[in-house]
Image (cartoon, coloured by chain):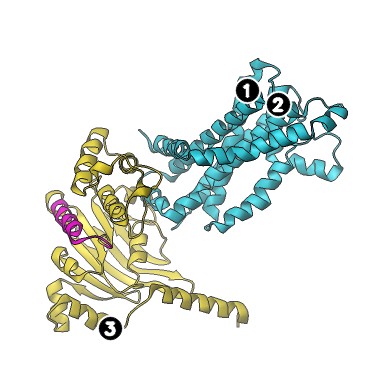
Chain colours: A cyan, B yellow
Amino acid sequence: MSAIYILWLRELRRYVRSRAQVVASLGQPLLYLLALGFGLGPVFQRAGEGSYVQFVAPGVIAMTVLFSAVFSGMGLLWDRQFGFLKETLVAPVPRIQVMLGRTLGGATVACIQGLLVGVVAFVAGFRVVDLRALPLALVFMGLIAALFSALGTAIGSAIENIQGFQLTMNFLVMPVFFLSGALFPLDHLPRVLSVITRVDPLAYGVDGLRSTLIGRAEFGLALDGAVLVVLGLVLLWTGSYLFRKIEV
Amino acid sequence: MIRVENLVRQFGDFAAVDRISFEVGAGEIFAFLGPNGAGKTTTIKMLTTLLRPTAGAIEIDGLDVARHPHEVRRRFGIVFQDPSLDGDMTAEENMELHGVFYHVPRKVRVERTERLLRLFELWERRRDVVKTFSGGMKRRLEIARGLLHTPKILFLDEPTLGLDPQTRNQLWTHVKDLNQAEGVTVFLTTHYMDEAERVAQRIAIMDHGKIVALGSPQELKQQTGKESLEEAFLALTGETIRDESANVSRDQLKMMAKMWSGRR
């Protein structure tokens, strides 16, 4: 059994044990899905864009994966606070393995959360247009999860206090979510906003999910996949570099 | 086994460890004594690759710690002064994770886990999540975990802090056994003179980041002309009470002063 596996398993065990947290973390996506989905539905329909629940569900799934992945990546901060981080840092395990185990574990948890929201969306009336594309949608979910889990780990390695977490949430994660096109279509946007959305990595994740799930694409799957893979690798590398530098 | 030369660790203007040098032989039990804030934990952190020294060299088992941190990590085990368990996992899972980290074969791990958890009276609670444990139980689990693999060097940073005499006794008996049966080198820090005297062959007394005396308990007593190690310790380090946070706040004050006055 390797260190990567046991750390991955640790993330899963913690997830399964914190049932209250699971429910709590699903609250926000559900609110977006149901309140916005049905609240903005009529306006969206009248604008000739079709069903808003159908449109927003992939976005809300992407959001769930984003939040969950960044959270677990930044779980590093809590491990630092409660001391467990030391145990992993003195162990004769290459730090890249420690980092990978954590990141993969966090990504897996994020995917499970995304799937749960997907199931709820189905109950709310969301339908996948072409079931054959579903495996590809799962791949995109995995890419989003890995990318942002690595980002979380990178940030968690670079900052030392819990206060930094709030800062990251407000100035990085929330903008990434709101500017990704998870909630609104990216066409016909004001020029500035359009440029900003194009540098938001989540925009490509949302687009990938939306293409595969409801057949509506903005950038195209090839570009989506390429951006996510390349940026994901860069962040993984950055994360493991910063993780290697940690002192306690 | 451990060789330290002119080791320095600076935090801002404050030298937590100030040019210390010492050697610990293979199979030796070596104790670090010192008042709060003397620099013991900082030294251990540098020896165990958790902190990079500002200057100086550390060699462990012939390996340069700065250049081969990973190789060095294979050679030691450590029981930290402050908690390092995962509170969301069970006692057994904490042991399992440690065993995997240190490449202990599964069979050995399972058998050793049982022996150690029984020794430290945690076996009945092995399936309970650690955050439900009392302070003493957590401490015992930390120690049990530190002993799961048999390293060449065992670092114990104030391992008996907050333990009752029974557990303390168990711990030192076990550590002495390990030292005699498997030749494990032990490097420990403690506040309890009687413990140091009981287990350590040599003692270094540290104060204000420097080693102020080094020798066997006997030698330290002779050197100061005192009857007990406790008296020798007080003679060497003075009788004023130290406060760890005092250093920090003094440091912070200095930083603030710098902030307001700028570089002059």
Q: Position of residue B224 (x, y in %)?
A: 17, 83
Determine the chain carrying the residue at label 3: B
Rendered residue at 36%/59% (across/down): B82
Is A120 or A240 nearer to us in this picture? Answer: A120
Left or right relative to A57: residue A49: right
Left or right relative to B17: residue B190: left
Q: Position of residue A182 (x, y in %)?
A: 72, 36
Q: Which mark is residue B52?
A: none
User: Few, some or many C-alpha atoms within 10 Å of disc 1 (few <14, some 14-19, many ≥20)?
Assistant: some
Q: Which mark is residue A221?
A: 2
Note whether residue A204 is visible: no
Note whether residue B140 is visible: yes
**Helix, strand or loop at mark 1:** helix
Q: Please state which amino acid type lies under the numbered disc 3.
A: Gly
Q: Nearer the viewer, mark 1 or mark 2?
A: 1
Q: Which residue is mark 1?
A: A136
Q: Nearer the viewer, mark 3 or mark 2?
A: 3
